[in-house]
Amino acid sequence: MNNGIEVRKMREKLGLNQSQFWNRVRVQQSAASRYESGREIPASVQTLLVMAYGTDKQAAAALAALRKQK
């Protein structure tokens, strides 16, 4: 989930509006709209998206990668 089009498609597949989807990762609707319109999504937000909406395996890998960083 590293680009806005991919994220918007996932949000729509889940049947959520922008506020519902992005609140889970603590992103304001205004920023969410910018991301979904093509603005670059910061790496930290990408990680949160994977942890919140990815598979269990993807979420575990994201957490493991965070714990390994120094």
Image (cartoon, helix red, strand yellow):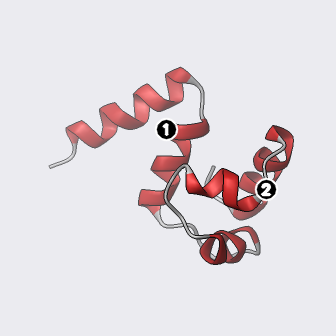
Q: Position of residue 26 (x, y in %)?
A: 49, 59
Amino acid type indicated by mark 1? Met
- Mark in the foreground, 2 or 1: 2
Instruction: Answer few, some or many: residues within 10 Å of disc 1's Cα (few below 14, many 20 plus, some between 14 and 19).
Output: some
**Sequence order check, earlier mark of 2 and 1:** 2
Q: Residue at x 71, y 63 (%)?
A: 4
Amino acid type indicated by mark 2? Asn
Q: Position of residue 30 (x, y in %)?
A: 65, 78
The label number, if any, that marks residue 51 in the structure image: 1
Q: Which residue is mark 2?
A: 17
| Label 2 residue SS | loop
Q: Tell me the quarter of the picture where residue 2 sits.
A: bottom right
Q: Residue at x 32, y 38 (%)?
A: 65
CA distance separating discs 2 and 1: 19 Å
Residue 34 appears left or right of 62: right
Residue 26 appears left or right of 67: right
Q: Tell me the quarter of the picture where residue 36 sits.
A: bottom right
Q: Position of residue 70 (x, y in %)?
A: 14, 49
Q: Residue at x 72, y 53 (%)?
A: 7
